[in-house]
Amino acid sequence: MGGDQAPAAVVAGAIQAVRRRDVRVTLVGAAARLREELASQGGDDLSIAIVDAPDLIEMDEAPLAALRRKPRASVRVAAGLVANGEAGALFSAGHTGATFLAAHGAFGAIPGVDRPALAVTVPTRTGAAILLDAGASVDCRPEHLVQFAFLGAAYARIALDIERPQVGLLSVGEEAGKGSDLVREAHARLSKTTLDFIGNLEAREFFSGRADVIVCDGFTGNVALKIGEGLVEAAEDMLREEMGAEFVSRIGGLMSRRAFARVKQRVDYAERGGAPLLGVQGVAVVGHGRSTPQAIENGIALAARLGREHLVERLTEALAAQKLSP
């Protein structure tokens, strides 16, 4: 029931996922409305289960208070299905804070992890990087950023197949003394770990590929992602305006549009589907609030893949093998 276009886009994405991704899906929400939507989209003949959850966490609600008032909220019921073994993974495009709290409450945290983090895969000039936290924890302490670094490095080995990920700390300057008190203390602690810590990473190097793992608090990470999304959309509009301005540039413009389309595909959140919540003892993937059916399908596929590849067990083993606290 979560997301700007829910439940229509969510149901459409679920139908596509079942038909094309070899997954089983349970839709959790207002049962009558979901059945109606499923029938209207021609998916009532598929083996898509529906679990009734009459309550919904609205985007403007405080998540903790809302979850306490609404024990049958769809995201809470869905997290419970995973915790009870009735489903293998959770995907939600709804309230990020509510999803975080529901998953954390239902699954518990991996030993040694105080704050789970959202890990977004971002494109870079050389391939991809893992950014965390992307919005789960806006108020962090230095030890939380250290934990994010270990989680991100472990996930980069799984998702990007990088044996020794380079870890960078997002800051306002490369020097160790630059940044807020949080960043400076985190830098000092990360320098003492066994991670391949390369120091501070300035925002202009965000997409450079210099770091395989980019660490920051959730507020900073979420703002950085939204700026990137907005820049791509604005650049696309400006390019379209310029291409239409000069008739003589149409041939070159066609080539440019094709190139830009390929670039846009690399940075489009719909292609990624969502961000896994790392640090909890269950698979949870959080989608963008603006998720389209394509993004929903990709998010469901990502959640299913991480479940099949034993993400939680591999993260737990990776963290246990290293000294988490410097």
Image (tube, grey):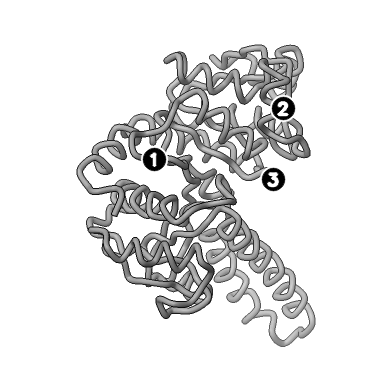
Q: Whole-percent x and y of residue 284?
A: 49, 33
Residue at (58, 70) in percent of width and height: 260
Q: Residue beneath label 3, please?
A: 290
Q: Secondary structure at mark 1?
A: loop
Q: Is residue 2 above or below residue 214?
A: above
Q: Identify the amino acid type marked 3.
A: Arg
Query: What mark, if any, has residue 96 been given in the picture?
Result: none
Compared across the picture, whether 105 is left or right of 152 comes to: right
Q: Which residue is mark 2?
A: 66
At label 2, the amino acid type is Ala
The image quadrant where one finds the C terminus is bottom left
Q: Give the CA separation, mark 2 to mark 1.
A: 25 Å
- Residue name at image x 44 percent, y 77 percent: 177
Q: Is residue 204 above or below residue 48?
A: below
> Dot 2, how many residues are within 10 Å of its Cα: few (below 14), some (14-19), or many (20+)?
some
Q: Is residue 325 above or below residue 232?
A: above
**Which label lies toward us, 2 or 3?**
2
Q: Nearer the viewer, mark 3 or mark 1?
A: 1
Work out whether residue 252 or residue 317 is closer to the camera in this orientation and state it: 317
For image coordinates 26% across by 59% down, the residue present is: 193
Q: Secondary structure at mark 2?
A: helix
Please tell me which of labels 2 and 3 falls first in the chain: 2
The answer to which quarter of the image holds residue 282 is top left
Task: Give the mark nearer the N terminus: 2 vs 1.
Answer: 2
Q: Which residue is mark 1?
A: 113
User: Mark 3 or 1 closer to N-term?
Assistant: 1
